[in-house]
Image (cartoon, rainbow, N blue to C red):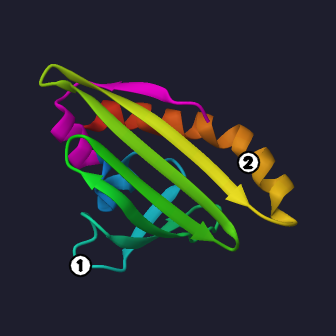
Amino acid sequence: MSSQVVHFPCSPQAAFDYLSDPARRPEWQSSLRAVVPLSDPVDGPHAEWIDVTWPGLRPRMRTTIYEPGVRWAEVGHWRGVSATLELTFDGDDGGTDVAVQFTLSGAGWRRPIVAVAGLLAPGAVIADLRRAALNVT
């Protein structure tokens, strides 16, 4: 997925704090029902958790980049498929543009499934981030 941008009506730090907190994700991520913490705390550098999704997927997630107000990324793994989401924050107290990079990968027999999912997932990611922009405080 090439980089897309979603505008948030808040400071980069407020957008970062909201989006980087896995416990807040069920508020805006359409497929997510719950988060099971695997680290304490569940947010911050090297945090780990399990996403509990309505389709039944249970990827193990980990924060890979944690630069408050600037950049955040996660990687998730589930049954041979990996997904990476990276967010970059640019703005001021008047608003923030969040640049989004999302990739899926898988090998062997998973490759065709990942190719199809890779066509659909970016739209869902952007829709979820637009929902987050409406919810952020």
Residue at x-position 60% and y-position 38%: 122
Cα separation between marks 1 and 2: 32 Å
Is residue 48 at all visible to an observer of this figure? yes
Residue at x-position 76% and y-position 53%: 114
Residue type highlighted by circle 1: Asp
Magenta range: 1-18
- Residue 135 x, y percent position in the rendering: 29, 37
Residue that mark 1 sits on: 40
Q: Which quarter of the picture shows residue 69?
A: top left
Element class at badge 1:
loop
- Residue 109 x, y percent position in the rendering: 87, 66
Q: Quadrant of the N terminus?
A: top right
State the mark number for residue 92: none
Element class at badge 2:
helix
Q: Local crowd at mark 1 within 10 Å, few (<14), some, or many (≥20)?
A: few
Residue that mark 2 sits on: 117
Q: Which quarter of the picture shows residue 92?
A: top left
- Residue 27 x, y percent position in the rendering: 36, 49
Residue at x-position 33% and y-position 32%: 133
Vertical order, 31 against 47 (above or below): above
Residue type highlighted by circle 2: Ala
